[in-house]
Image (spheres, rainbow, N blue to C red):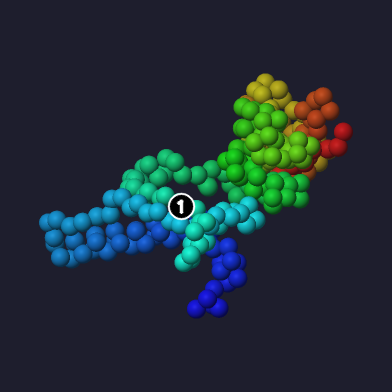
Amino acid sequence: MSAQIPPLVRDSGIPFDLFIQALTEQLDKAQAAMAIKARVGKLPLTFAVKEVSMDLRAFVQMVDEDVFLRPAGPGESEASTIKLALTTITKPMIEENAVDFKAEDPKFSLREALGDRITEDEQRRLERIGVRTVTQLNELKKTAGADVIARLSRMPVNRLQQALMSAAAPRVTRVESGANGQATRRVHLSTPGLRGGRLPLVRAAGEAVPVVESGDDAIVLAPLAHQLGREAELDFGEGEVARVELSEGRLGQWEAP
């Protein structure tokens, strides 16, 4: 039997989150089975799992920055004792406290937006402090600052500054193109750090592109038909110039000073 167990599992155990998931999955199956039994048997009274407590003796270790548990065997007295207590919660409580993985379009995930400017290890460091999207990274920069992010994520400040600069580049979030002529064409851009009233100068295909709306962190352009899909230059002043293709989902880049 032990020969069929992968060496990593045999030596290090299983990831802690996988253990919790397996445990709760079996409890869910038990609850579902009891619900079916009550419906089929038309029982006026049945039982439910409310709370589960257990003391688990296991060895705890880190493997590639993940916590692994290996249950203690006979005679292994140096194992730690882990006390687990599971209780019931409602669906609204789960949704209120769970991470919203649909908060941002996948096209603008950290990996897509930052590319090779961030390593997998650095991405995991940011995820540990709750940063999974470009929007979250920019929001945290506003409220806490780069130094705080670097300290909490344990990322080198220079690497974090590069990531923040890339995350703050303009990106096209939506393109509206109707059938009633050029007036209906609108290109929505996310421009982190832009404040309302500060209009950038935008040019594409050698001509100016009108900025019809401007607010905090966003602008709306009204390009001509031949400017759609072309690379646009956005001059925010003070040497801040970015380029982005006027197509939905495109990510911009800052020009080197």
Along the horizontal axis of the image, is 65 left or right of 31?
A: right
The quadrant where residue 61 appears: bottom right
Q: Residue at x 66, y 39 (%)?
A: 153
Q: Is residue 51 visible?
A: yes
The residue beneath circle 1 is 81
Indicate the secondary structure of the residue bearing disc 1.
strand
Question: Hey, what amino acid is under mark 1?
Answer: Thr
Side of 207 where 182 appears, left or right: left
Rendered view: 94 above or below 36 = above
**23 and 251: which one is in front?**
23
Q: Residue at x 35, y 51 (%)?
A: 53
Q: Position of residue 151 (x, y in %)?
A: 68, 34
**Foreground residue among 166 and 218:** 166
Q: Residues within 10 Å of mark 1 (few under 14, many from 20)?
A: some
Query: What's the residue at 58%, 63% (across, down)?
Result: 12
Q: Is residue 228 above or below residue 211?
A: below
